[in-house]
Image (cartoon, rainbow, N blue to C red):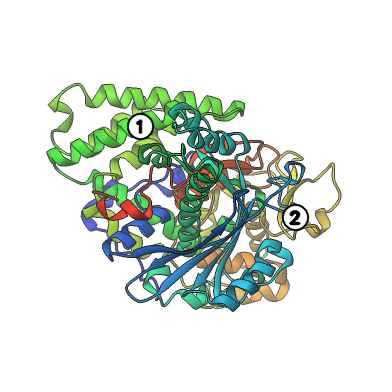
Amino acid sequence: MTCAPLSPVPEAAQFRRDPAQVMQLARLGLAHPTRLSFLRILLRRMQRENWRFDRPVFDIDANGVGRAVYRAIGPERTYSLVAFAHDLPADMRSDRVIATAWDATFALCDGTPDAADLDRLAVNVPLQEAGRVTQKELTLSRANRSVRLFEHVIQCLSEGHQPSKDDLAATGYLMRTTAVYGSGKFGAATHHSLTDRPETAAPFQAEMLTVWMIRTFTVDLVNHMARMRDATAAVPLDRNLRRNLGVGNSTGLGMAPFLVRHPILLNNWMMAREEALARVRAQQTAAPDKIKRFIQALRAAQENAAVWTSAHPLQQERLAALRAGLDRIAAYVGMGRDQWADHPWDALWHWGQAHLDTEAQEALLSLMLEPHGGLIDELEAYLSADETTAFAIDGGQQIAALKALLANNYDWALEVDYDDLKAAGRFWYVSEDKLEPRLGERFEEAGSDRELPLDIGRQAAALFEALKDFAGDDPVARLLLAHHQHRAMVRRVQLTATRPFAEIRDNLIDADMLPIDMLRCKLACFGASRFDPRSDRWVRISLFQNAPYPNDLHTEPDL
């Protein structure tokens, strides 16, 4: 199923933001999840198609060790999460990618696994990277318990009472994943092999389904262990309390280069979001039900911001700005009906640009999209891209035309002096230990001779400099015959010429560049919340917090 090019609504043209503003890393790093986030797309589809869910296997002992199978049954296909729960000694519990054991390991299977499949998976899935799965499996994942909260919840439930809402809110999850592998890793099915299925055509749908069912497993596990501890006194976790729990995730630099390596996808994700914002701003009136839904979303955002915490100084500053900004928005919309006159959403947006800092501006974007599902949800069809289609370099293009593209679309890159030590202070490479991307300090560490080509700005500037030696009417082929090292950048410039949101418009090897901003941008597209940086290179987040569970998905009024 190939994604068609997005067709913008003409009347929304004047309301679209400039890509030069949108694609700055400092703004991308303040992104908030929206109703176009991948997990929301998954939930809406399952609700719309009336998917069914069951748990045919739950063979787990009093210590929380065993296996379980959860099924998601769609109109055409069934997907099964196979979960293995382990008794992990405390000294072996680690969120680092080099860990070799976890509290739980998982695989998402195509169809319903039989006994032989379960035995095969029991040998391989707990090993994660050291094991192997087959084309029957779509994802491979692992998770660790939030040790204090996990045990606290079990103890409370086993004694017949609920844990406090504040205790749950402080952490926000019972387990956190340290990896959710898909797209062909370790023998699993490739993403391309699934694109003809409507339910997996949108980005990362198999991964999102995996995490959503892991969330149910974690609640079932604490309920089960509480009952095994005291069958007479134990009570299940309250429905409202469990709603506030998501699945945690620890994510590091391995995810960051994705946005650079997949410029067409990045363009589609950002363009769909920006088209959605423009459509909302273009509305001439604000219906009462839309205003009501906006205010509900605003209150929920204020509640979330109130319990969202971080020990990282930068994130603490951002949280303070967010809370203050949300309060300003609430005060503004509470002033009376004048705010909802002609083109009210555009007026609200312009007010936000003048009175809010960037963090709150991006939160306002998310809030403004929330009431307008009927207007923007169809944009989810444009988020994917067929990256298997080759894009041939146009060798006949004139040098002058290529130079104009660089000057117009890569001006941000041409302004940097890459001979400056700070501007070239870092380099990207792949670690030998885990074959994962890492970031090195160019003038302090060895390894820059194995640098990954993620220095797009520097490559653009080098190409622009090389063009000076050629006449404007020379063909690009002549340049490439003389300087083959510029082939990749020429191809990229031509590829992104009609894709204005394809590039992060910042120097990604600068000594002050914050990789966590790249992580947050991608994770917000997933639908992640509660961003909690632990350094400038890895972050903890929560997925599916306040989302429905399988048994109440179909009673949810608006997803």
* Position of residue 39 measured from the top left corner of the image (x, y, whole percent): 41, 54
- Which tag is nearer the camera, tag 2 or tag 1? 2
Residue positioned most to the front: 232
Q: Earlier in the sequence, mark 2 or mark 1?
A: 2
* Position of residue 519 measured from the top left corner of the image (x, y, whole percent): 57, 47
Vertical placement of residue 160 versus 445, above or below? above
- For the residues marked 2 and 1, what is the alpha-carbon distance in whole angstroms? 48 Å
Label 2 amino acid?
Thr
Q: Where does label 2 land, which residue?
A: 100
Does 192 sit left or right of 126 as displayed?
left
The quarter holding residue 356 reads: top left
| Dot label at residue 353 | 1
Report the quarter where the N terminus lies: bottom left
The quarter holding residue 326 reads: top left
**Of 162 and 291, which appears nearest the observer?**
162
Does 363 sit left or right of 11 as displayed?
right
**Of 256 and 181, which appears nearest the observer?**
181
**Of 438 and 311, which appears nearest the observer?**
311
Q: Is residue 7 visible?
A: yes
* Position of residue 440 measured from the top left corner of the image (x, y, whole percent): 77, 47
Q: Residues within 10 Å of mark 2 (few under 14, many from 20)?
A: some
Vertical placement of residue 473 versus 454, above or below? below
**Of 496 and 260, which appears nearest the observer?**
260
- Residue drawn where x is 41% and y is 32% of the image: 304
Label 1 amino acid?
Gln
Vertical placement of residue 443 versus 201, above or below? above
